[in-house]
Image: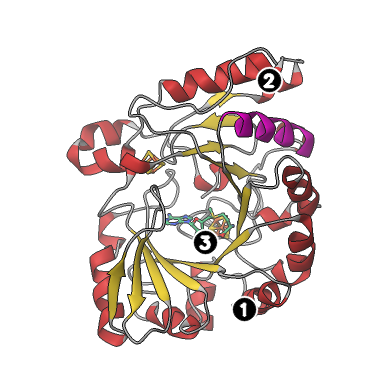
Amino acid sequence: MKIKLGKIEDIYSRQLKDIRISVTDRCNYRCPYCMPLEIFGEKYAFLGRKDILSFEEIERLVRLFVNLGVEKIRITGGEPLVRKDIEKLIGNIRSISDKLDIALTTNGYLLFEKALALKNAGLSRLTVSLDSVDKDTYIKMNGGKYGPSRTLQGIEEAERVGFSNIKINVVVQKGLNDHNFVDVAEFYRDSKKIVRFIEFMDVGNKNNWKLKDVISSSKILEIINKKFPVEPIDKQYNGEVANRYRYIDGKGEIGIISSISQPFCGDCTRGRLSTDGKFITCLFASDGIDLKKPLRSNASDEHLISQIKSVWSSRNDKYSQDRFNFPKDADAQKNKVEMYYIGG
Ligand code: SAM
Ligand code: SF4
Ligand code: SF4
């Protein structure tokens, strides 16, 4: 390859370091904050098989991204474990580089069956979404689908097969789990798992987001602190999205992700690859550049790299920061892409 490789930066000097890949737009859950059942019912037209990137296409792009300085890949969706043979993709990505940090975010429903295969394929880390340990609340938060028992068993199995420091994601939404989210913290205290509480975000246009339904990170912290006193600790690395706190009694740590009340665009090194092959530079973008077409018309690596470089080097995204400072600009971004399609 004759083209210049190496790290690339956007107009605010943010290096492209992470890629989140949505490997499917489908999901076995219907969380109202992501894929509400009223919209994503039986008649909803998901992408067809030909429309989504094949494993070979994803691997080729990952190789190019790694040549451009990417250090971390997150496999997500939709629900990544519903994509057939997902462990093969992970194994092939692992063979690109031993050093690559490969993480996966899942709702955990299929984790019990998949944990060992994922570990053997070389997955580095797991994040499991679990909005409540209370059955009724959990069911409400995934669209009336299932209780939490399979996910809880999946988490145990993942630990048994050797995943350490599993992260647990809890979206906090007013009227749904604000009365009992602290129970998830309690459940995993003293377990080495890091529970991270996430403010309900205005991703996409279909989740009926309203500011009044957001429980701010300061409120989340206040509620946790009342029951289990915590103190702040430093971030582990630049660009870490969660603010970290440790329990004063030494029983582990939690994180709080404040996309709404304390945005972190300044450190955002994340690019996204949509299910159908668009390279997207912000969770709240309205579109991205299509890489599938050139991939399928025999474009050279040079061409693909120059496309990626030109998009990233002109990137000026800072949606979360502008959301309230410049609400008109944020409002203008009305056709935001949906989260299941670009990966949370
Ligand atoms: N299906 C997998 C899962 O739920 O873990 C992976 C994809 S999901 C889109 C990734 C993460 O985004 C999950 O932790 C989910 O809770 C979070 N998420 C989805 N919609 C959200 C919203 N509106 N606000 C905050 N977090 C959201
Ligand atoms: Fe599915 Fe995850 Fe979205 Fe819930 S958050 S609907 S589990 S993709
Ligand atoms: Fe990154 Fe966009 Fe989120 Fe800001 S709003 S942190 S630029 S993804």
| Disc number for residue 31 | 3
Is the C-beta separation of discs 3 and 2 under 8 Å?
no
**Element on which disc 3 rests:** loop
Residue 152 - label: 1
At mark 2, the secondary structure is helix
Badge 2 is on which residue? 293
Residue 6: x percent and y percent? 55, 26
Q: Is residue 129 above or below residue 182?
A: above
Whether label 1 touches label 3, CB < 8 Å: no
Position of 257 with respect to 18 (left or right) is: left
Residue in view at x 71 percent, y 77 percent: 160
Q: 164 or 197: nearer the eye?
A: 164
**Which residue type carries mark 1?**
Leu
**Is 245 included in the stretch rendered in magenta?**
no
Q: Amino acid at mark 3?
A: Cys
Separation of residues labelled 1 and 3 (CA atoms): 17 Å
Q: Pick the residue in front: 95 or 222.
A: 95
Identified by mark 2, the residue type is Lys
Residue visible at 81% across and 52% down in the picture: 85
- Mark 1–mark 2 CB contact (< 8 Å): no
Magenta part of the chain: 55-68
Give SS at disc 1: helix
Label number found at residue 62: none
